[in-house]
Amino acid sequence: MALKYKNQSRIYAKAIDPVVLAYTALAGLAAAMIFGIAPALQALRPDVMDILRGSGRTGGLGGGRRLRNIVVVTEVALSFVLLIGSGLMIRSFSALQRIDPGYDPNNVLTFRLFGSGGGQPQERAAFIRDLRGRLEALPGVESVTASTPFPLAGGYSPLRWGVRTKGDPAQYAAVIRAEVAKFRSNLLIAEMQPMEALVKRAQAGTRFSLLLIGVFAVIAVILACVGLYGVLSKIVRQRTAEIGVRMALGATPGSIFNLVVGHGLRLSLVGVAAGMVAAFGLTRAMTSMLVGVILA
């Protein structure tokens, strides 16, 4: 009889909070209204002379271009910081996975017993000794122990039974249950699971946090790319006449391409430089959370 263990990772325990959802929707609506007011007011009072003067070259961009450039640089810098932070956290988690915890969780079945009663220390010691002897006598069982606190349980934890087997521990669940019932019929077995599953459940919170950090970093990069594309497309659209004049005077398509792409590269380089400065401060603040990462 194979032991079935239901993984209760935090990612399965999450649900949509109506309050948070409503707040997010209202915040998005408010942001769209606030940042849409200025362009709307500007569109209501167009300056025809400025538009005509700006149509030949880049005068029509003005302060709006500077604002867009600042936004793109900020997006690139923040996405760079998030990527650095998530990379350091993932690297730390990988380093933790390689550290010897001092025990081998492979081929170990764990469980708790209820109904044995408190009793005197001598009675409890005799109970543990007798049950351990019976379980160790089972075919395929290499060793049995009972301990508290249990590894990864944190703080005080009830007495739990470390059963090491020669093969898949889940295959010994039925045999162990039957032997415990023979020993004392009033004993109740709970939380029977392979220790590997217990370790994974203990790491579920960290894995979930790393997943969120990685997702946020990817979203930030996508937003930065979209913002950079928007700025470049706006520049090309407003400099169409200028580009036409340049090509009429002999400019090659390659030089026009370099003109536009060069602007995007400059914005990206400024954003990366700002992100490196911010990431330097971030890594110093994250020193206590990093494992196996040496900061220069």
Image (cartoon, rainbow, N blue to C red):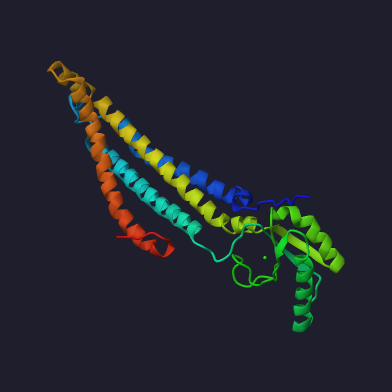
Q: Farthest residue toward the left? A: 249
In the depicted structure, whether residue 227 falls above or below residue 187:
above
Q: Can residue 263 be seen by looking at this rendering?
A: yes
- As drawn, is 10 to the left or to the right of 56? right
Residue 163 visible? The answer is: no
**The furthest residue to the top:** 248
- Percent of width and height locating residue 64: 27, 37
Q: Position of residue 124 (x, y in %)?
A: 76, 78
Q: Is residue 46 left or right of residue 95?
A: left
Pick whichever, 197 or 73, lies toward us.
197
Q: Is residue 81 left or right of residue 163?
A: left
Total count of labels: 0
- Relative to 41, residue 91 above or below: below
* Residue displayed at 32% across by 47% down: 77
Q: Nearer the viewer, residue 147 or 262?
A: 147
Classify residue 259 by image quadrant: top left
Q: Nearer the viewer, residue 113 or 102?
A: 102
Q: Residue at x 25, y 31 (%)?
A: 261
Q: Quadrant of residue 190?
A: bottom right
- Answer above or below: position of 48 versus 146: above
Q: Quadrant of the C terminus?
A: bottom left
Say left or right for 257 vs 181. left
When asked about the image quadrant of residue 47, the answer is top left
- Please tell me which residue is depicted at 77% across the width and 70% down the height of the picture: 133
Q: Which residue is rendered at x = 30% and y = 28% of the image? A: 233
Q: Position of residue 31 (x, y in %)?
A: 42, 43
Query: Residue 23: percent from the left, percent from the top?
Result: 52, 48
